[in-house]
Structure formats: structure tokens, C-alpha cells
């Protein structure tokens, strides 16, 4: 019986002698070092490209420089994708190792539980048998009792030593059993901790995957921007400069419109009360644009902000899509589309959207990135950023107020641009530009 206990304890000791941490394979050390070295080089190249992109803002505004700027952006995004892929693969390996570790740990715990159950049962049986034997043979560890039941001194000594050894083994087995149970409970807690680590790692892996998808979409948009630039300019510097000047003139006219709006606010009598859905103008092409369309913008400005001098074309602009798609603002014109797509969706399908009447959305659109210097000329914070939505309907399309408010009409002529500003009770100001 005693040897059986010892065998069971030996099994328990073996099960818990194995390290349960995440295994690291020695043969992967060199690969890990190589990967780390490559990522360090990747970071250095990213820093150089970021500096080149920043320096481009101060370079001459030429087609060649713009193409170089786009090439640097593309190369930077490719390096970022490479970095994210490496991080993704590292986390995937970590996840696989953790899954193997959890499986091994669960198997060890199951075997240990079985061994402890057997040891407990055997120990209980041993105690029971020892009790029965002592009752039937009157065996006892008491020396006086041994002397009274033995015929000679040698028999007494042998029986006394045997009973002491049995007692010591019983105490040892009991202590080992308690220690095994303690270790077992610790490993169960360790298992639960690793399960939690597994869930956290899964979340991190999901985030890395989403980041990789976003970077891939950005890369596709950047390459598309370059292709579009070469297409619309036919790689001709004169064509590029002409388009550059037109966009710059549009930005300057909008700034003039803001200033004229302030003048009207200061002189009561220029404002008109309008209701949601009222016609406030007709779609046009004023302000040196190539085709009829409406530039629609949403800002967080009040008339008092203008009077306090706290206004700018560059700041407090909001994404109109957030209001149009939710219906909190009405549509400024009757369109063939019923919602504004996400920036990524628009950049991936801009030709199709433009064919339906939606040619620019809010954010870093492909078109805005073609002329980042122009969009950032008056507003450094809008470098390559379009702060409104450009949409159009058939020629002569009516333009509607998107909500009740106080309207001001600003006219700078066909060359300068014409439009309407409406201040709403909720603290928003909406802009309707390029009207007839």
C-alpha cells in the first residue's frame, strides 16, 4: 500500500515539475533578432520619409514635387503596413503558443486531479485498514502496551520501530497530499489567468487586423490619387498650375465671403428668417469652378462669434455627413444618393459617386490630396483636407435650407463666388457656396 502512495506522489511531482509559462523555442532566437533589426531599420526609414513629407510643404508647388510627395506617402504607408504585419504575426505566434500552453496545462490539471483523488482514496483506505488491524491485534505505538503484549524485548523493539515508521510515513503522505492540493489550486488559478490573457490577446490581434486593413485602404487611396493626378494633368506642368490656381482662388473667395458676412452681421437688416426646406438659391458655378455644384459646409459658429472676432474658414468645421445621414439636418438639394458614404468608401469609389452627384466628401479625399499645398495655403490645419461636401444635381437645381435659421446672402460675383450662410438655433452655421 505504501509503495502505491509513493508512486502516485511521484506522478504528481512530475506533472508540476514542467514549466507552464509560454514556451520560447531556442531555434527562433535568431529569427527574432533579425525581425527586430528589420523593424528598427523600418522605423528609421519611416522617420526619413515623414521628414521629407513635412519638408514638401515648403518646396516649390510643382507637379514634379507633388508626385514626389505622393510617392513618399505611398512608401511610408508601405513601411507602416510592413511594420503592422510583423506585429500581427508576432501576436499570432504568441496566441498559438498560449493556446498550446492552455491545452497542456488543462491536461496536467486533469491528470493531477485524478492522481489526487486516487491518493486520497488510498490514504483513507490505509487509515481504515490500520485502525482495523490495531483493533484486532491490539497493536499500538504505546510502549507500555507493547511490553504487555510481547513475549520478548526484541519483538517489542521491532514492533515499536515498525509502528513509528508507519506513523512517520502517514504524516509525510498527508503533508505531501496537502502540498499537492495547494499546488493544484494554484495551477487552476494560473489557468484562469491565462484564459484572461488569451481573451486580451485576441482583442489585440483584432485591433492589429483592423489597423492593417485601414492602412491597406490608405495605400490604395494614395496610389489612386497619384494615378488620378497623372490622368487629369496628363503629366503636364501647365495644366497642373492652372488647376492649382483655380482651387487657390476658390479658397481665397471663401475667406472673403466670411469677412463680408461679418460686415452684414454688423449692419442689421441683411438677415432673413428661413424655414427648413425653403429655397434659398440655385446651384451654380460661381467662384471659378469647372462645373455646377454646391459646396455645403457645417460650422459651429454663432453670429456673436463673428462679432467677437472668433471665426475662421479654417476652424470649427464639422462633418456634414454626421447630420445629413441621421436626418438632424435636411438635404440641401434633391440628389440621386440617399446618404453620404464613409471617407474610405468614397475614396475607393469616387468616380462612381461623382457620377451620381457626390464629388467630394469631408476629410482627406483623393482630390484634396492632389493639391495639399492649396488646401493648406490659407489653413495649415487643412493640408490635403476638404472641409465640406461637394454635390450637384441637374443644371438649375434648387438649393434648400437644411434647418430653420437666420440667413445671410453673400455675393462676390461669378468670379468671386456667391452663397448663403444660415445661423441655426442649435449653435450651428451652414454654408451654401457656388450659387448663381
Image (spheres, rainbow, N blue to C red):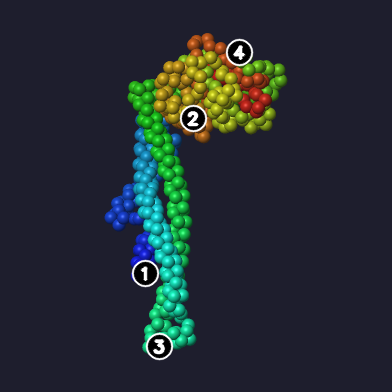
- Report, in whole angstroms, how far the alpha carbon at label 3 lies from the one at label 1: 28 Å
- Report, in whole angstroms, how far the alpha carbon at label 4 lies from the one at label 2: 28 Å
Q: Return the residue at label 4.
A: 279
Indicate the quadrant containing the C terminus: top left, top right, bottom left or bottom right.
Answer: top right
- Report, in whole angstroms, how far the alpha carbon at label 2 lies from the one at label 1: 80 Å
Q: Return the residue at label 1.
A: 1
Residue 225 percent across, percent down from the top left: 39, 28
- Of labels 3 and 2, earlier in sequence is 3
- Of labels 4 and 3, earlier in sequence is 3
Residue 430 percent across, percent down from the top left: 60, 23
Tag nearer the camera, 3 or 2: 3
Tag nearer the camera, 4 or 3: 3
Please report contact status of discs 4 and 2: CB closer than 8 Å, yes or no.
no
Tag nearer the camera, 2 or 1: 1
Write the residue at 48% across / 25% down.
341
Tag nearer the camera, 1 or 4: 1
- Of labels 3 and 1, earlier in sequence is 1
- Of labels 1 and 4, earlier in sequence is 1
Vertical order, 18 against 2 (above or below): above
Q: Return the residue at label 3.
A: 151
> Furthest-right residue in view?
268
Amino acid at each position: 500500500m505504501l509503495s502505491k502512495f509513493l508512486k502516485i506522489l511521484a506522478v504528481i511531482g512530475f506533472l508540476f515539475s514542467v514549466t507552464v509559462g509560454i514556451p520560447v523555442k531556442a531555434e527562433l532566437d535568431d529569427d527574432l533578432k533579425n525581425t527586430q533589426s528589420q523593424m528598427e531599420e523600418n522605423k528609421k526609414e519611416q522617420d526619413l520619409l515623414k521628414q521629407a513629407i513635412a519638408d514638401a510643404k515648403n518646396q516649390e508647388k510643382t507637379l514634379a514635387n507633388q508626385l514626389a510627395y505622393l510617392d513618399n506617402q505611398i512608401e511610408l504607408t508601405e513601411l507602416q503596413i510592413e511594420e503592422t504585419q510583423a506585429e500581427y504575426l508576432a501576436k499570432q505566434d504568441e496566441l498559438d503558443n498560449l493556446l498550446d500552453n492552455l491545452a497542456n496545462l488543462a491536461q496536467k490539471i486533469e491528470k493531477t486531479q485524478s492522481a489526487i483523488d486516487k491518493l486520497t482514496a488510498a490514504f483513507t483506505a490505509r487509515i481504515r485498514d490500520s485502525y482495523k488491524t490495531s483493533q484486532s491485534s491490539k497493536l499500538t505505538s504505546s510502549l507500555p502496551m507493547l511490553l504487555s503484549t510481547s513475549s520478548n524485548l526484541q519483538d517489542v523493539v521491532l514492533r515499536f520501530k515498525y509502528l513509528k515508521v508507519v506513523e512517520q510515513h502517514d504524516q509525510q503522505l498527508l503533508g505531501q497530499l496537502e502540498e499537492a492540493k495547494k499546488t493544484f489550486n494554484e495551477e487552476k488559478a494560473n489557468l484562469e489567468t491565462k484564459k484572461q490573457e488569451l481573451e486580451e490577446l485576441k482583442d489585440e490581434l483584432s485591433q492589429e487586423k483592423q489597423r492593417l486593413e485601414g492602412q491597406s485602404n490608405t495605400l490604395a487611396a494614395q496610389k489612386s490619387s497619384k494615378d488620378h493626378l497623372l490622368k487629369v494633368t496628363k503629366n503636364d506642368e501647365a495644366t497642373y498650375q492652372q488647376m492649382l490656381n483655380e482651387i487657390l482662388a476658390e479658397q481665397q473667395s471663401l475667406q472673403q465671403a466670411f469677412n463680408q458676412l461679418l460686415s452684414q452681421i454688423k449692419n442689421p437688416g441683411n438677415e432673413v428668417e428661413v424655414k427648413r426646406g425653403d429655397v434659398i438659391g440655385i446651384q451654380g458655378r460661381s467662384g471659378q469652378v469647372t462645373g455646377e455644384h454646391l459646396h455645403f459646409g457645417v460650422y459651429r459658429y454663432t453670429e456673436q462669434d463673428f462679432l467677437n472676432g472668433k471665426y475662421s474658414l479654417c476652424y470649427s468645421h464639422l462633418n456634414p455627413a454626421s447630420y445629413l445621414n441621421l436626418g438632424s439636418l435636411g438635404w440641401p438639394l434633391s440628389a440621386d444618393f440617399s446618404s453620404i458614404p464613409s471617407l474610405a468608401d468614397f475614396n475607393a469609389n469616387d468616380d462612381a459617386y461623382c457620377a451620381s452627384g457626390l464629388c467630394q466628401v469631408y476629410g482627406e479625399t483623393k482630390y484634396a490630396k492632389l493639391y495639399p499645398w492649396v488646401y493648406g495655403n490659407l489653413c495649415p490645419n487643412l493640408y490635403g483636407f476638404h472641409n465640406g461636401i461637394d454635390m450637384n444635381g441637374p443644371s438649375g437645381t434648387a438649393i434648400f435650407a437644411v434647418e430653420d435659421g437666420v440667413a445671410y446672402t453673400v455675393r462676390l460675383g461669378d468670379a468671386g463666388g456667391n452663397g448663403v450662410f444660415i445661423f441655426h438655433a442649435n449653435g450651428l452655421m451652414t454654408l451654401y457656396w457656388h450659387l448663381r
